[in-house]
Image (cartoon, grey):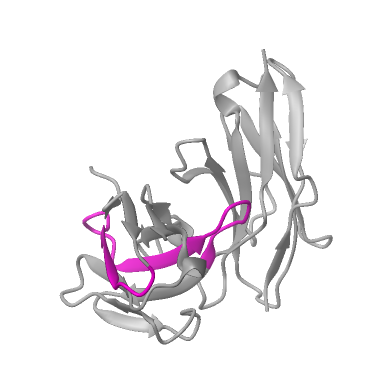
Amino acid sequence: AQTVTQSQPEMSVQEAETVTLSCTYDTSESNYYLFWYKQPPSRQMILVIRQEAYKQQNATENRFSVNFQKAAKSFSLKISDSQLGDTAMYFCALSGGADGLTFGKGTHLIIQP
Amino acid sequence: DTGVSQNPRHKITKRGQNVTFRCDPISEHNRLYWYRQTLGQGPEFLTYFQNEAQLEKSRLLSDRFSAERPKGSFSTLEIQRTEQGDSAMYLCASSLPHQEGDTQYFGPGTRLTVL
């Protein structure tokens, strides 16, 4: 069975700061994808960034980047120049099996003005 | 390009009633997924379709839960004899396999409250 662990239930930073959200995972699949999704208070789940496990290069999307450590099964999300609109629940998710995505419990990120 | 849509957005029902939710995926996506999300938790996978075929349903929570996708387009999720423990957000997602890493795009969800 696949597992995803997010060990930070809540984080709070000041606007414009950089913040890193942690995620570890476990899977027996050799080919898989990792995702970070954002769920603002309106609750629509939005894709932030995607990483293919066979690619060594870390994915980046504007202010969002990941640190993918395959051997350590670690997949952290870095948000640079944080903005008030980044306030949301952030979920780490793993695909690769036949059972859809496996999600972590989420990290509630609060950006303070 | 419209996203995934779900109806209704909110449903309040009395215990013992049946409810049905609808999901319309992104038009070219042939995979459709259903998830349940309870407060403070990440989404939990329930079932998925490729076109009209339901390829995984062992994760449906009980035999009161069923899903259909009769023509490979929209899908419905039905809960029979609802219980208070069924209160949750029900999320639908769609994807196009072998493109974008089979990335799933989510709808806004249907919030179910069972009184």
Residue B23, magenta (yes or no)? yes
Residue at horizontal 38 percent and vertical 59 percent from the top: B93
Q: Residue furthest left?
A: B71
Is B42 a magenta residue?
yes
Q: Which residues are magenta?
A: B15-44
> Which quarter of the figure is the N terminus of chain A placed in?
bottom right
Q: Is residue A18 visible?
A: no
Q: Position of residue A47 (x, y in %)?
A: 49, 45
The residue sitting at 44% across, 62% down in the picture is: B102
Which residue occupies the foreground of this view, B2 or A62?
B2
The quadrant of the rendering that contains the C terminus of chain A is top right
- Depth check: give the residue in front, A104 or B53: A104
Residue at the far top: name it.
A113
Residue B28, percent from left and from top: 23, 58
Residue A54 appears left or right of B94: right
Image coordinates of residue A103 in percent, x first then y, are 61, 60
Answer above or below: position of A106 versus A73.
above
Examine the rendering and report whether any part of residue A49 can be seen. Answer: yes
Vertical order, A6 against B21 (above or below): above
Q: Which of the 4 quarters of the picture holds residue B100? A: bottom left
Identity of the residue drawn at 39% across and 70% down? B15
Residue B104 versus residue B5: which sits nearer the camera?
B5
Q: Residue at x 66, y 37 (%)?
A: A65
